[in-house]
Image (spheres, rainbow, N blue to C red):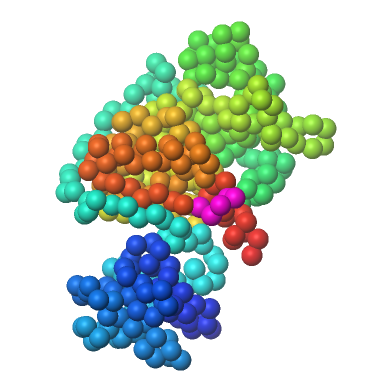
Amino acid sequence: MSEIKEIKARLTISEVAKILAKAGYLKGLTRDGRKVRCPFHEDKKASLDLKWKVREGKFKCYGCNKRGDLIDLWEGAKGIDRKQAVNELYKIATGQSIFLDQLIEIKKTGRLPEYSRPEPEPEPKPWGVEPELADKVFRSLAEFNGWTVEGAVRDYLHRRGLTDETIERFKIFSLHDTGESRKFLTKNFDLETLKALLLFDSKNRFLFYQHRLIIPIFENGLLTAIQGRYFIYQGALYNTNPPASVGKYNNGTGSGAGKLFNGDILKDLKPGSRLYLCEGAFDSMILSQEGHNAVAFLGVNHKEESLLARLKGFEVVIAFDNDEAGQKAAIEIREELFKLTGQEPAILKLPDGIKDVNEYYIKRYKSK
């Protein structure tokens, strides 16, 4: 079956219109779902009849006389070409992708302001260490562990929805033996450098002995930081739930300050591209895996102005955790971004009871 036939077999024009309306691409959808303001001309009367030819799934606008099917409607409402429209609708129809437009709360002041993308500023030294040296230390640690993810860690990542391709894409690795990793680092690098990178504390203790799952953070192609996820073994089993006294994440080169996970993608994105801003690396990786542009703060408390400035010119959607702290931070970020860039982002509103994008993906898509 062709993609277009598959789309029409699984979706109706009314369902498509509801998705577009909820995402802000269509206005004035009537309660009965029959009419909507036409996206093909300036329309104030809801002149487009979605049920003009119900059996054929065709619409007609009585204002401009435009006619078409659900693909034409999607194409016109979003302002994209037919090929892209078919691709997006096919993914929605077959459940291949997290399609988040229908969850976005649109709230904008108007068109994005004109701007010229500034020249990138030199990357600051990570906690006093040259980026090239940080890259050498972290890459050496990854190479010592074979840039690989051991079986139990891979199983956990699969449970979180990540594919092997995504694990490889983001260069995730695990510390196979934390004691041996500690010996390797102290043998090959001076302790002061390791402390400056927050791999060791003031008492010379290796800070990643309980955080064996390592997510690298790249800036301008250099591995300038790592984030460790709590992951310890208890006999033949593993535990990913830290006690209250231990943080879920541990960050080399600081607590996340000045870092934007997956930020290197910004250099190649076109102005006006939709960009999801997440609260953590897992949400960003899941969205990237599903074909979206996504970056992440390393925690909602790390939202320096320099990081926000990097988001200028993109159509930002804030996709923070669906709890009180996350939604409060999302509103604050929206206000700060508007003040800084003249751009007011949208906020992703997940269904009640869903913690974050990662959980939404697992419950709504991975299980299909």
Residue at far top of view: 203
Residue at horizontal 59 percent and vertical 50 percent from the top: 353
Residue 365 at what x, y percent from top left? Answer: 59, 61
In this picture, is 59 found above or below 38?
A: below
Q: Quadrant of residue 336?
A: top left
Q: Quadrant of residue 40?
A: bottom left
With 368 as the anchor, is 278 left or right in this view? left
With 140 as the anchor, is 242 left or right in this view? right
Residue 245 is covered by the magenta coloring: no
Residue at horizontal 43 percent and vertical 89 percent from the top: 54
Residue 65 at what x, y percent from top left? Answer: 23, 86
Provide the major secondary structure of the magenta segment: loop
**Foreground residue among 304 and 96:** 304
**Foreground residue among 58 and 212:** 58
Q: Is residue 365 visible?
A: yes
In this picture, is 336 found above or below 3?
A: above
Residue 257 at what x, y percent from top left? Answer: 42, 26
The residues colored magenta run 350-354
Q: Is residue 296 visible?
A: no
- Numbered circles on residues, count: 0
**Foreground residue among 51 and 189:** 51
In this picture, is 135 found above or below 152?
A: above
**If the image is split into quadrants, where does the C terminus sit?**
bottom right
Residue 61 at what x, y percent from top left? Answer: 27, 83
Residue at horizontal 52 percent and vertical 82 percent from the top: 9
In this picture, is 143 found above or below 323?
A: above
Residue at far right of view: 235
Residue at horizontal 61 percent and vertical 8 percent from the top: 203
